[in-house]
Image (cartoon, rainbow, N blue to C red):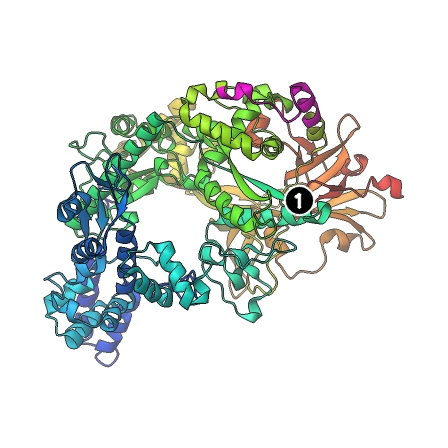
């Protein structure tokens, strides 16, 4: 329903549509009984209202055996987990050695954990009659209880199976739980429960809606049964001991702590062969062997997947040139050891977050909503609408309250405050709960861009924003987008979790070519220590323009890719003894005193820091950055796959007219107040509306012009007559555009798309010796057309080179010296923008910044030959393969 403000004020629920469908079918089936049968109704109802079954996710393989992992909602998983947890418990008394539980104590605690969802450590101490002042080894301020048998506690509830659940054999329990996980038709599920297990309808419905633990464990059924057998032993063995005992019966379980088979590889294989236990399984189908990721499986995190593949390429190239490594150091993205005060702060924050998450779980249970991570995150975002826990939670864009019951309805959205398509920022700090109507009105804009023209509304928004956390408030400012682009796009901060995960996996992966032992192997260093040593040794100043990047809180020049080489140097010269001594000292010191700790650390070149800096500086001058190129080639055998997005998403209406440049005149919808001048109004498609707008804005410009447009939309009368355009928000205007035409079966073009993406840059030498270019769009590159236009016009033309974005050119700069330049972008006109191979950061912003010395090199097609331009290849370890100027080969 459209409200008074021309926005949607109500959103109907699915139930209303279902009722309408049933009413229509019931009424119309009287007139068409043969066609509108009950079977047809049920089939069509299923198609319209219920999503088709999702493709079942692949289940990982067991750590020990080649079999699927057990789901967490499985009796054997729950039994094994409980035995592991309780067997690992120790009772600690001040001044005494910790002691394990006896078999009787273990069995007593297990008996109670099997009956309930949780059991507190304090209750355990009471049951075991522990002395005053004792505690358990797993007990912390954040962890005050152990999780019980989640499945048994839920299913054996008196409203479901009750005591009869315990009487079922394990195989029958597994059958029921499997049915609950896989059956999508609730009616069939409840009917099956009633027929097979004699449950009442109320009990069957309660069972079908039970919230069970999601996901899978790391072990399959064979390993789980074997471990349960050993974990039940009278001496209460811990997990590692149970695995060792099980390994005597099952050789596959002998080397549980080492997933490698002991083989040292000549070169790094695809990571899926080494890290098979860490990733979803592949097909292992022989016909897929050419596609390693498909055959072996791959990590779902794209950052980690790409990172491990690049590690393989670099390490194998290094082995090819320098032989096998004796030691590999991986920089780990984590802090040094924390001191006691820092530990207290971290533990306090963890405790608060844990308690808040538990409260949200309880709240979801009260609301009858599934206790999932997504729902807890939604509830957290709703809570953050107001810092006052007792205050109202209002939509930040309209100020209308959002009740907790409304939160899970279709009327509420989670919005990216700064548009995700423009920032790629999916962090919680960039999200806010709002009404769906407001989200649609905001569209792909920042809050300021979308709402600031309405002063009253903007005042309401400012009032709501004051209640939000500080890390969200700045995103509502007028300069939010600019601030994000200039200050907030810190790759390391956004990718911290990814790089931690990546570095840990990399250490395991790299051991396949560099096994531990004899002083060699793979080890990790903390990234924060690398930063401190780099700064203490004065290495930040080695890169050009370093003062530009030191402003504010930045510690090094991240605008030059070679800062990674400096990090690699520091990591490489930091041996284990230095790492251990600094780490131990850091554990005793305050954060602010860490610089003092490093004052005694000697650089690797003895006491001559200047000699070390000169040697590293010389190496940096010779360092060439290798950029990952993407030549837009689909994988072999991929049918119907393109190398990229063929065109812009927006479809444009064609008028059939063209301008003097051959561009199509298309019709687009624009916001009324986005038109800035009478010249814009002249392009309004509707002639009557155009004349009315021009008359209403005559003599107006600038802000007065915008106010006149707003008045036009609000006015009830125009020239003494009722205003037919009252409430007008958008107008259709014409504009010239080079389009990709879409035609119907008769060959008539009925809409057009903007190409918006150039794939390659082909350079040709004409018979006259002149160089010409052909810029090929992504769309044209995928057509079946014959040879390019240049070749048709000049049959004897010779192709000089084919270039893609991120390729590297060697050419003479403005001073006549040969420089290595990366291709940043090129236009259909043939103009190409280049940047030195080492330049990093937001290059477009830097180019526009008068304070930044970086500027693009703009090259026209005609100057490429004069500059001796040629494509060069840089391998993954920075070696340059340059064919040399063409003039030398002539």
Q: Position of residue 478 (x, y in %)?
A: 39, 26
Residue 690, percent from left and from top: 41, 37
Q: Residue furthest bottom?
A: 34
Q: Residue furthest right?
A: 890
Residue labelled with disc 1: 876
Which of these two is toward me, 613 or 765?
Answer: 613
Coordinates of residue 177 in the picture (x, y in percent): 25, 66
Highlighted range, magenta: 597-616
Figure check: 66 above or below 710: below
Q: Please tell me whether residue 858 belongs to the stretch shown in magenta.
A: no
**Residue 855 relative to residue 353: left or right:** right
Nearer to me, 310 or 138: 138
The image shows residue 389, relative to residue 635, as above or below, that is above
In this image, 114 relative to 240: left or right? left
Residue 55 in view in this figure: no
> Does the rendering let one see residue 529?
yes
Residue 280: image quadrant is bottom left
Compared to 610, does 81 lie above or below?
below
For the residue pair 237 and 173, the one nearer the viewer reads as 237
Relative to 469, 301 lies left or right = right
List x then y, in percent, for residue 505.
50, 48
Identity of the residue drawn at 12% across and 71% down: 199
Q: Which residue is drawn at 65% across and 30% down?
A: 856
Rendered-image quadrant of the C terminus:
top right
Q: How packed is label 1: few (under 14 Cα within 10 Å), some, or many (20 or more)? A: many
Q: How many labels does the image show?
A: 1
- Which is the main secondary structure of the residues drawn in magenta? helix
Residue 843, quarter of picture: top right
Helix, strand or loop for disc 1: loop
């Amino acid at each position: 329903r459209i409200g008074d403000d021309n926005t949607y004020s109500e959103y109907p629920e699915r139930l209303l549509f279902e009722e309408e469908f049933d009413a229509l079918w019931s009424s119309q089936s009287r007139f068409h009984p043969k066609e509108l049968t009950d079977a047809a109704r049920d089939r069509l109802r299923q198609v319209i209202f219920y999503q088709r079954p999702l493709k079942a996710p692949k289940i990982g393989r067991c750590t020990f055996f080649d079999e699927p992992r057990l789901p967490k909602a499985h009796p054997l998983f729950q039994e094994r987990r409980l035995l592991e947890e309780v067997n690992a418990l120790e009772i600690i008394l001040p001044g005494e050695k910790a002691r394990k539980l006896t078999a009787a104590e273990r069995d007593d605690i297990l008996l109670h954990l099997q009956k309930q969802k949780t059991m507190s450590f304090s209750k355990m101490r009471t049951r075991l009659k522990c002395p005053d002042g004792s505690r358990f080894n797993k007990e912390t301020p954040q962890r005050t209880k152990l999780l019980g048998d989640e499945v048994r506690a839920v299913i054996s509830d008196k409203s479901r199976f009750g005591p009869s659940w315990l009487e079922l054999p394990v195989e029958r329990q597994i059958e029921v739980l499997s049915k609950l996980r896989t059956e999508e038709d609730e009616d069939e599920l409840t009917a099956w429960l009633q027929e097979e297990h004699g449950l009442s309808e109320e009990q069957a419905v309660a069972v079908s809606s039970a919230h069970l633990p999601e996901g899978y464990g790391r072990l399959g059924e064979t390993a789980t049964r074997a471990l349960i057998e050993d974990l039940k032993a009278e001496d209460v063995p811990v997990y590692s001991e149970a695995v060792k005992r099980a390994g005597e019966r099952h050789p596959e379980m002998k080397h549980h702590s080492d997933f490698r088979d002991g083989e040292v590889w000549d070169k790094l294989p695809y990571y899926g062969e080494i890290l098979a236990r860490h990733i979803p399984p592949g097909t292992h189908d022989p016909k897929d062997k050419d596609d390693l990721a498909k055959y072996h499986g791959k990590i779902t995190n794209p950052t980690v997947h790409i990172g491990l593949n690049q590690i393989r390429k670099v390490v194998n190239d290094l082995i090819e040139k320098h032989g096998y490594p004796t030691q590999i150091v991986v920089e780990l993205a984590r802090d040094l050891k924390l001191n006691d005060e820092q530990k207290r702060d971290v533990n306090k924050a963890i405790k608060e977050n844990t308690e808040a998450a538990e409260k949200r779980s309880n709240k979801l249970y009260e609301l009858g909503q599934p206790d999932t991570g997504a729902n807890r995150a939604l509830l957290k975002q709703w809570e953050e609408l107001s810092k006052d826990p007792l205050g109202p939670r209002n939509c930040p864009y309209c100020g209308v309250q959002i009740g907790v019951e409304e939160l899970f309805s279709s009327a509420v959205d989670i919005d990216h405050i700064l548009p995700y398509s423009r920032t790629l920022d999916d962090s919680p700090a960039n999200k806010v709960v709002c009404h769906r109507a407001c989200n649609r009105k905001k569209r792909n804009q920042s809050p300021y861009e979308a709402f600031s023209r309405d002063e009253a509304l903007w005042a309401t928004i400012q009032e709501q924003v004051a209640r939000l956390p500080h890390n969200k408030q700045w995103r509502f400012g007028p300069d939010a987008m600019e601030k994000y682009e200039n200050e907030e796009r810190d790759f390391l901060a956004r990718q911290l979790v990814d790089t931690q995960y990546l570095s840990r996996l990399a250490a395991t992966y790299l051991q396949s070519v560099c096994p531990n032992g004899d002083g060699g192997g793979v080890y990790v260093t903390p990234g924060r220590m690398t930063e401190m040593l780099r700064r203490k040794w004065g290495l930040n100043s080695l890169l050009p323009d370093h003062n530009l990047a030191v402003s504010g809180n930045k510690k090094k020049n991240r605008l030059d890719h070679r800062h990674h080489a400096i990090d690699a140097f520091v990591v490489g010269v930091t041996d284990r003894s230095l790492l251990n001594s600094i780490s131990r000292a850091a554990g005793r010191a305050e954060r602010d005193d860490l610089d003092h700790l490093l004052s005694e650390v000697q650089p690797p070149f003895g006491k001559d820091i200047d000699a070390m800096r000169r040697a590293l500086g010389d190496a940096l001058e010779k360092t060439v950055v290798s950029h990952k190129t993407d030549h837009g080639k689909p994988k072999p055998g991929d049918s119907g796959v393109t190398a990229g997005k063929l065109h812009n998403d927006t479809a444009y209406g064609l008028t059939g007219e063209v301008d003097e440049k051959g561009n199509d005149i298309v019709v687009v919808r624009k916001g009324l107040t986005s038109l800035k001048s009478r010249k814009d109004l002249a392009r309004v498609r509707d002639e009557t509306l155009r004349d009315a707008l021009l008359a209403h804005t005559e003599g107006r410009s600038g802000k007065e012009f915008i106010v006149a447009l707003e008045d036009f939309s609000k006015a009830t009368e125009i020239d003494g007559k009722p205003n037919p355009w009252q409430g007008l928000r958008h107008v259709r205007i014409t504009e010239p555009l080079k389009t990709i035409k879409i035609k119907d079966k008769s060959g008539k073009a009925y809409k057009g798309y903007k190409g918006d993406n150039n794939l390659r840059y082909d350079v040709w030498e004409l018979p006259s010796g002149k160089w010409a270019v052909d810029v090929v769009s992504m769309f044209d590159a995928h057509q079946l057309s014959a040879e390019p236009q240049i070749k048709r016009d000049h049959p004897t033309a010779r192709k000089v080179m084919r270039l893609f974005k991120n390729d590297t050119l060697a050419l003479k700069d403005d001073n006549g010296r040969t420089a290595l330049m990366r291709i940043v972008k090129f236009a259909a006109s043939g103009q190409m923008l280049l940047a030195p191979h080492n330049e990093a950061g937001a290059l477009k912003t830097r180019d526009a910044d008068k304070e930044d010395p970086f500027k693009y090199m703009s090259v026209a097609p005609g100057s490429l030959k004069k500059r001796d331009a040629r494509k060069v290849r840089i391998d993954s370890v920075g070696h340059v393969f340059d064919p040399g100027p063409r003039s030398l080969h002539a």
